[in-house]
Image (cartoon, rainbow, N blue to C red):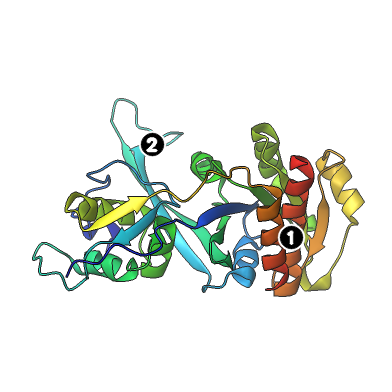
């Protein structure tokens, strides 16, 4: 299936563009009785019971990021998900954070 | 069913590392060998007026391009997640890099000594942007054709930019590439 068939040909989200690392969290269960939902919308709701980033949703569902942005935009408009930015307040990160990353990587 | 508001709404800290380099140099392999999720490839579709030589004069053309980026994830702790992004290799998709590069912790430029010139554009890009980066030489099959110093000379790198050797297929070797980058970032912050 052509990727943008899922979005009905829409290339841009109804809401503003979302950062690749913006988090999406479901407010409703995927079984929500809403006829307008497509399987991909439900898949996103299911995946984001625990908040996930836009990039991660795209990867997990094997959909282009542009398509995920449109679908998340639909869900946002219907108030079925909330989105929030990843915590970038420590950008550039402090030394403790960097050390934690180094330790985490070494432990791989 | 409405979900109860989630207990820990505090978003995890997301850190982003870019992996750049020429086409076929092993970016996908490097991202994949460290990612805790299966190496994922996400596609970014871009629609825009076509630029370049294939314009037909007087005809409005639109072009839709799909760009594949590699995407990996490493959970560092409960509240820190590291994302690895392999940048699209083809030069014509550079406009995508700007979005990826915003807020990036740093970058790994992967080099293949058989085609060293392929990584010049990446080195230029990160130098111009002021993004901290290191160069990792991917030694295919343990083959080492040049020493790190010769690679540094060939790329005309600043003396403080680390050059490391790696085998992108090997997790132990690959993770040390990212460790070297974060150490480099740390040294620059100090």
Position of residue B87 relative to residue B101, above or below, is below
Instruction: Give the position of the N terminus of chain A as an image quadrant.
Output: bottom left
Where is residue B174? Give x, y as percent. Answer: 72, 67
Between residue A86 and residue B147, name the one nearer to us: A86
Residue occupying the far front of the picture: B7
Element type at mark 1: helix
Please report contact status of discs 2 and 1: CB closer than 8 Å, yes or no. Answer: no
On the same chain, marks 2 and 1? The answer is yes
Between residue B117 and residue B78, name the one nearer to us: B78
Where is residue A18? Give x, y as percent. Answer: 36, 46
Query: Residue under circle 1?
Result: B179
Where is residue B137? Give x, y as percent. Answer: 78, 58
Position of residue A95 relative to residue A30, above or below, is above
- Snapshot quadrant of residue B4: bottom left
Chain of the residue under label 1: B
Q: In the rendered view, does A34 fall on the left or right side of A101?
A: left
**Residue occupying image coordinates x 66% and y 49%:** B107
Q: Residues within 10 Å of mark 1 (few under 14, many from 20)?
A: some
Instruction: Give the position of the C terminus of chain A as an image quadrant.
Output: bottom right
Q: Is residue B10 visible?
A: yes
Q: Is residue B115 visible?
A: no
Q: Kindly report which numbered mark, 2 or 1, lies closer to the viewer in this rendering.
A: 1
Q: In the rendered view, does B73 fall on the left or right side of A34?
A: right
Q: Earlier in the sequence, mark 2 or mark 1?
A: 2
Spatial CA distance of label 2 from label 1 is 40 Å
Where is residue A76? Give x, y as percent. Answer: 23, 52
Element type at mark 2: loop
Query: Residue under circle 2?
Result: B50
Chain of the residue under label 2: B
Between residue B82 and residue B145, name the one nearer to us: B82
- Snapshot quadrant of residue A37: bottom left
């Amino acid at each position: 299936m052509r990727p943008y068939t899922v979005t009905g040909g829409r290339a841009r989200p109804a809401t503003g563009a979302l950062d690749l690392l913006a988090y999406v969290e479901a407010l409703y269960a995927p079984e929500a009785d809403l006829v307008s939902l497509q399987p991909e919308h439900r898949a996103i709701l299911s995946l984001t019971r625990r908040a996930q980033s836009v990039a991660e949703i795209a990867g997990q569902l094997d959909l282009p990021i542009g398509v995920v942005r449109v679908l998340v935009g639909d869900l946002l408009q219907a108030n079925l998900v909330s989105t929030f930015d990843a915590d970038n307040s420590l950008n550039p990160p402090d030394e403790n954070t960097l050390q934690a990353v180094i330790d985490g990587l070494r432990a791989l | 069913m409405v979900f109860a508001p989630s207990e820990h709404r505090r978003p995890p800290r997301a850190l982003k590392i870019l992996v750049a380099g020429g086409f076929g140099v092993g970016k996908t392999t490097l991202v994949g060998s460290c990612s805790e999720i299966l190496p994922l490839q996400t596609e970014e579709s871009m629609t825009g007026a076509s630029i370049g030589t294939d314009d037909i004069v007087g005809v409005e053309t639109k072009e839709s391009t799909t760009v594949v980026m590699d995407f990996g994830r490493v959970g560092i702790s409960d509240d820190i997640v590291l994302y690895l992004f392999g940048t699209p290799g083809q030069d014509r998709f550079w406009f995508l890099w700007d979005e990826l590069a915003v807020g990036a912790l740093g970058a790994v430029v992967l080099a293949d000594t058989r085609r060293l010139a392929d990584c010049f554009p990446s080195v230029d890009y990160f130098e111009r942007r002021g993004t901290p980066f290191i160069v990792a030489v991917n030694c295919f099959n343990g083959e080492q054709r040049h020493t790190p110093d010769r690679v540094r000379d060939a790329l005309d790198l600043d003396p403080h930019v680390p050059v490391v050797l790696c085998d992108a297929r090997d997790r132990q070797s690959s993770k040390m590439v990212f460790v070297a980058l974060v150490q480099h970032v740390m040294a620059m912050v100090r």
